[in-house]
Image (cartoon, rainbow, N blue to C red):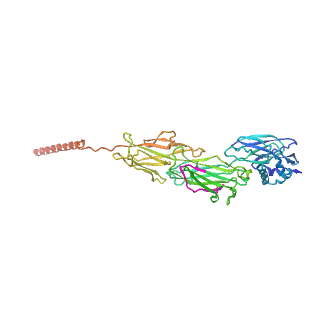
Amino acid sequence: MKKTSKLTAVLLSLVLVVFLPLAGNAAGTTYTLTLNNPGETTHQFQVYQIFIGDLYVNGSGERVLSNIEWGNGVTAGGKVFFGNAVEKAETLKTEADGKAFADQLVSVGYLTNPVQKTVAANSTETIANLEPGYYLIKDAGNSQNMENGVYTAYILEVVGDITASAKIDVPTVEKKAKDINDTLDDDISDNPWQDSVDYDIGDTIPYQIVGTLPTNYAEYDQYYYKFTDNMCAGLTYQDDAKVYIDNAGVETEITSQVSINSSVSNSDTTLEITISNLDNITGVSINKDSKIVVRYTAVLNQNAVSGSAGNENTVFLTYSNNPNAGGVETANTPVNKTVVFTYKLQINKVDENNSPLQNAGFTLYKKDSSGAWQTVKTIVAGSETQFTFAGLDDGDYKLVESEVPQGYNKFEDLEFNISAEHTSDSQTPTLVSINNATTEGETITLQGSKLATVSLASGTISTTIMNKSGSLLPSTGGIGTTIFYIVGAVLVICGIIFLIAKKSMKYEE
């Protein structure tokens, strides 16, 4: 009885692209399998011989595998379980049949005598001297030592030298936030999603998570999908997460079908968004090109850290990684993060002798997008001589000495701008500069000739505000009264001269 190459259509790799040679092969010839690993991590592949047979090329140029027998890669127990090799091969009429057969061989443990090859990322390895037949290729059990490993298992026909490119790609996750400058923006809907942003304490920050699916998503009987999002102490989750399936830009909300839980430990918040089986989601079609999108907001709170350390928000994805185990085995993606930066203004209050000066109060204002000044914070007068306005975003500001120490002149209002540069599209967001200062302790100009120093580490702009004493009024008997005496004497002399002149004029008449 013959088994023709139509079996190929059933047993071809579930996740392989296979290139078959065109030339015929003589009886007794062996062939070479080239394993291509286009992924970014090293994998160990195991190759098992499932069926062997006699190969010839018929008059139509078709390769025909006849006299099929069990290969040496199937255990004795497996051969008993599956029965006659030819009869088993005859039952494999669809792709689903082939997948179920591969799952059985792997999950029940009916495989033996593997040829094992370690294939580095973006490289190839070859296995020579393979008899014509059908071979199952899978990841070695210990090859999943990378953080985001994925298992593969597939059967392919070897009837000539063959190259197999394993599609072992994995889902990805990306976290972003939207930025806003209160002085410039009144609507952030068109602002891009970024890896780093800056905000004022008290501001609400929009976040977005986008997860993808693997190209072999359809091969899973079920697919587990879970986002684990961690927010630092400086961020307060607003309990407003919504989940969508995105198909080519068309979003369908599935929040009601998803488990969303948040918890706080040591002031950090963990948000878990779990879909136990994507196949159970109703009302929307999900395929390998679908994206899972989560959006929520968090408020930058009083625990926020200023400067280059930033306020991190991270996420990783837990996903099914073994189609042969029904999708119940999982792996994690690498962590993806966003950072919120915030800054502070520090005022050192001194007198004209550069000595610390008490009893001053300050109010900081920020210009909004309409051009109006909005109060940020007022610090009332007291014993303090150093004033800190923390949690500032970029934008235009005005510092007003709202309470002046008694006996001193008021300092002129200081209008200035805070600007910052940070890597907004990076896996490791970094604060690059504040007001163009890129080195620690660099001197900048705030307004006119007003100097300040910048600390990137603490995110601080520091400047000195000097009050000068008021003018002293003259005391009695001082120069002030002397001036009056002199002026009075001059007036008397002028009067005498006037009278003498008038009498002289009279005599002349």
Residue situated in front as seen by the camera: 356 or 288: 356
* Membership of 244 in magenta stretch: yes
Q: Locate residue 158, reporting x and y percent.
A: 81, 45
Residue 456 spot, x, y in % from top left = 51, 42
View extreme (right): residue? 1
**Image position of 213 (left or right of 241):** right
Q: Nearer the viewer, residue 182 or 59?
A: 182
Decide if residue 178 is on the left or right side of residue 1. Answer: left
Front-most of residues 266 and 317: 266
Highlighted magenta segment, given as a residue range: 229-251
- Is residue 66 something that shows in the picture? no
Q: What percent of the width, then of the height, locates residue 192?
A: 58, 50
User: Main SS of the magenta segment?
Assistant: strand
Q: Is residue 422 left or right of residue 76?
A: left
Where residue 29 sits, quadrant-wise, is top right
Residue 96 appears in the picture as rendered? yes
**In the rendered image, the vertical position of residue 351 relative to residue 100, given as above or below:** above
